């Protein structure tokens, strides 16, 4: 079957995909953000993976967290879900199969729709040498793992060419530290080890500490949960700045790559965990004006 030509109405929308790394749905809700509610309704959705790297691969395939509908074939869901890109990008005739053969959104946006494509990421497991860096004009691991504001201030948009930005935001990732907080004041959990030692324990996939009751200090886990909620409140102010930065023809999606466990079921963190809360994420998107 012949592929239909993807149509451009005029200049497509700029598209910004923001990922609050590790942010649980209920942390988002309890933070009661204001700016973050301006895009549209906040939905409860499910990530396709329980940790950062596979989840970002899926997101960059264009498959955003799903709604988990019953009695529906996966292929029908993908088709319907993908159709939303026509609205996001302001184009016509995009289908899931438009991405064949690479099946990768940045490459498709750049090669088929003429986008400039940029990624700014916080977590070293997503660094520019990974296979995720495909089809990007620029792809940067930011100097600090927890500074979305620095990303927003580096975003540039032109009238002639649509831009795609992926922002992987680390304030909501363990240790849920805001940019001004000195690293020696960050909470430490023994048994939580990162794969990147030089960046200490705060960058990891797979941080399971369920090796003994003593490791689960309820007060500490509650303190960590509150820190994640506080991080969302802080990010709400950065998102306000993002909204002031983007041109009016910009579509924005804000979601998370996976959830986080704060003691439920004997788990902390994310990664090698099978629990609803590690997949449960918030999702909101829309155009401001
Ligand atoms: Zn993550």
Image (tube, rainbow, N blue to C red):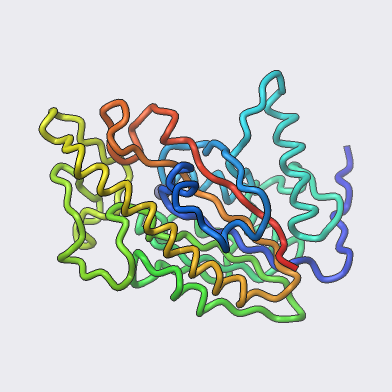
Q: Give the residue drawn at x 45%, y 73%.
A: 149
Q: Give the residue drawn at x 58%, y 47%.
A: 283
Instruction: Identify the image quadrant of the C terminus.
Output: bottom right
Instruction: Identify the image quadrant of the N terminus.
Output: top right
56 shown above or below 164:
above
Q: Which residue lies furthest to the left in this view?
A: 214
The x and y percentages for residue 77 are 71, 32
Q: Give the residue drawn at x 65%, y 54%.
A: 285
The x and y percentages for residue 143 are 34, 72
Q: Based on the displayed image, in which of its 4 quarters is residue 207 positioned? A: top left
67 shown above or below 232:
above
Q: Give the residue drawn at x 70%, y 18%.
A: 71
* Left or right: where 239 falls relative to 199: right
Q: Which one is nearer the viewer's eye here, 161 or 131?
A: 161
The x and y percentages for residue 152 are 52, 74
Q: Which one is nearer the viewer's eye here, 140 or 159?
A: 159
The x and y percentages for residue 122 are 39, 62
Q: How many labels does the image show?
A: 0
173 shown above or below 267:
below
Whether residue 128 is visible, yes or no, is no
Whether residue 151 is visible, yes or no, is yes
Q: Which residue lies furthest to the top in this view?
A: 71
């Amino acid at each position: 079957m012949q592929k239909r030509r993807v149509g451009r109405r005029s200049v497509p929308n700029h598209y910004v995909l923001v990922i609050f790394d590790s942010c649980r749905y209920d942390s988002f809700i309890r933070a009661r953000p204001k700016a973050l509610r301006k895009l549209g309704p906040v939905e409860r959705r499910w990530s396709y993976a329980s940790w950062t790297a596979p989840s970002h691969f899926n997101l960059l395939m264009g498959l955003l967290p799903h709604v988990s509908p019953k009695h529906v074939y996966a292929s029908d869901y993908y088709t319907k879900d993908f159709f939303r890109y026509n609205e996001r990008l302001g184009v016509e005739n995009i289908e899931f199969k438009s991405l064949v053969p690479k099946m990768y959104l940045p490459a498709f946006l750049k090669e088929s729709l003429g986008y400039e494509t940029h990624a700014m990421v916080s977590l070293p497991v997503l660094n520019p040498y990974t296979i995720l860096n495909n089809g990007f004009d620029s792809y940067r691991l930011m100097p600090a793992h927890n500074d979305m504001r620095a990303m927003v201030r580096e975003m540039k948009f032109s009238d002639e060419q649509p831009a795609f930005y992926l922002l992987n935001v680390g304030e909501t990732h363990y240790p849920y530290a805001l940019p001004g907080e000195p690293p020696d004041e960050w909470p430490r959990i023994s048994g939580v080890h990162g794969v990147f030692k030089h960046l200490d324990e705060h960058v990891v996939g797979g941080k399971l500490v369920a090796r003994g009751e003593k490791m689960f200090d309820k007060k500490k886990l509650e303190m960590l949960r509150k820190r994640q909620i506080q991080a969302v409140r802080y990010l709400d102010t950065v998102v306000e700045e993002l909204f002031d930065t983007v041109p009016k023809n910009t579509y924005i999606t804000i979601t998370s790559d996976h959830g986080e466990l704060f003691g439920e079921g004997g788990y902390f963190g994310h990664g090698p965990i099978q629990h609803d809360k590690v997949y449960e994420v918030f999702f909101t998107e829309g155009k401001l004006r």
